[in-house]
Image (cartoon, helix red, strand yellow):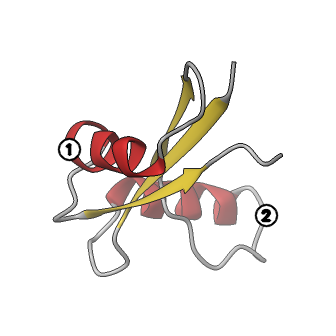
Amino acid sequence: MPVVVVDVVLKQEISDPQGQAVLGALGRLGHSGVRSVRQGKHFVLDVEGEPDEAELRQIAETLLANPVIEDVELHLPTD
């Protein structure tokens, strides 16, 4: 069964308070080399048959993400 991964993150121009909190915690723990953190969502979909990229993109953009404030990245299986 093919596995499709959908990653959803806030658009760069949208404030990410959770990412900022993680960045602050990293600095307090001595990890000063990290310059930016963006928090997001990760979905793993088991699909039947050959994955239909257009259908999966529609699912991601209408159900899994808010396209006004979030970017979607599809990771389709490779042969």
| Side (left or right) of 38 relative to 50 | left
**Residue 30, label in figure:** 2
Front position in the image: 50 or 77: 50
Asked which secondary structure carries label 2, the reply is loop
Q: Residue at x 40, y 52 (%)?
A: 18
- Disc number at residue 7? none
Above/below status of 34 relative to 39: below
Query: What residue lies at 38% left-to-right and 51% top-to-bottom?
Result: 54
Looking at the rendered structure, the kind of residue marked 1 is Thr
In the depicted structure, whether residue 6 falls above or below residue 3:
below
- As helix, strand or loop, the secondary structure at mark 1 comes to helix
Position of 34 with respect to 4 (left or right) is: right
The residue at 78%/48% (across/down) is 78
Q: Identify the residue at the far right of this view.
A: 79
Q: Position of residue 62 (x, y in %)?
A: 20, 44
Q: Position of residue 70 (x, y in %)?
A: 30, 61
Asked whether 75 or 53 is in front, the reply is 53
Where residue 33 appears, as percent x and y from the top left, is: 78, 77
For the point 28% across and 70% down, the residue is 15
In which quadrant of the rendered view does residue 50 lie?
top right
Q: Residues within 10 Å of mark 2 (few under 14, many from 20)?
A: few
User: Which dot marks residue 62?
Assistant: 1
Q: CA distance from mark 2 to mark 1?
A: 40 Å
Quick check: 11 above or below 79?
A: below
Give the left or right position of residue 30, taking residue 44 as reference.
right
Q: Badges 2 and 1: C-beta atoms under 8 Å apart?
A: no
Type of the residue with mark 2: Gly
